[in-house]
């Protein structure tokens, strides 16, 4: 059984060690963990695994940590879903002048082609040598086997040209 957990707290609350201690004390295992700073806040994303009793214990323990540290904790028991198709994993990266709708536009394009987004990250920064903000994104996407790759790549690059986005779409090599 698994439990997906998101945690959000202020800089003053170094909660990740508290969360990890609670996981250990409840005899659960960590399948995946991510932790990052977002300005004055910190965020953690965890996928925890254990039997039903251990998951119930960690849920109670996380509620206590939430109250004690004045952080926000959200928990969800994800349903196990088996993928029926063999997807092709691709990396998609974009670079453009900073605009609010870049991630939305790219996500809509992918969705309209039946492409699943596995992971997305983006950030804005001041470009060197010029006074313009630049926005970069990185997507990990899963392309269904029935999608023809060459026409998809051409259509995606045309889409990016229309929005003045520089993009790379390439298979993930492991």
Image (cartoon, grey):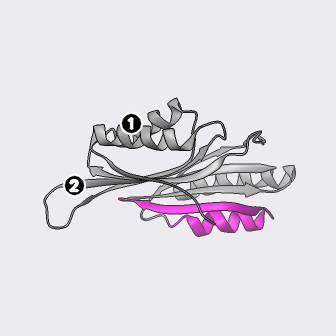
Q: Nearer the viewer, residue 29 or 104?
A: 104
**Residue 116 occupies quadrant:** top right
Q: Position of residue 79 (x, y in %)?
A: 76, 40
The disc placed on residue 133 is 2
**Is 35 drawn above or below residue 119 in the view shown?**
below
- The residue located at (63%, 66%) in the rendering is 174
Q: For marks 2 and 1, give the one nearer the viewer.
A: 1
Q: Nearer the viewer, residue 25 or 94?
A: 94
Residue 58 part of the magenta segment:
no
Q: Position of residue 88 (x, y in %)?
A: 64, 49
Which region of the structure is painted magenta? 14-39
- Residue assigned mark 1: 105
Residue 22 part of the magenta segment:
yes
- The residue located at (76%, 67%) in the rendering is 25
SS under mark 2: strand
Q: Nearer the viewer, residue 170 or 57?
A: 170
């Amino acid at each position: 059984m698994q439990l997906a957990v998101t945690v959000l707290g202020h800089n003053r609350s170094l909660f990740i060690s508290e969360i990890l201690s609670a996981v250990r004390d409840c005899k659960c295992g960590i399948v995946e963990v991510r932790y990052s700073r977002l300005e004055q806040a910190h965020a953690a994303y965890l996928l925890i695994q254990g039997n039903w009793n251990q998951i119930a214990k960690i849920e109670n323990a996380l509620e206590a940590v939430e109250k004690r540290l004045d952080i926000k904790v959200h928990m969800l028991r994800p349903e196990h879903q088996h993928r029926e198709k063999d997807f092709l994993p691709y990396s998609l990266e974009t670079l453009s002048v900073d605009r609010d709708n870049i991630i939305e536009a790219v996500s809509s394009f992918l969705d309209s082609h039946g492409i699943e987004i596995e992971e997305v990250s983006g950030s804005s920064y001041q470009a060197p040598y010029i006074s313009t903000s630049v926005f970069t994104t990185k997507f990990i996407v899963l392309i269904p086997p029935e999608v023809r790759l060459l026409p998809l790549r051409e259509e995606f690059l045309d889409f990016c040209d229309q929005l003045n986005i520089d993009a790379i779409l390439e298979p993930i090599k492991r």
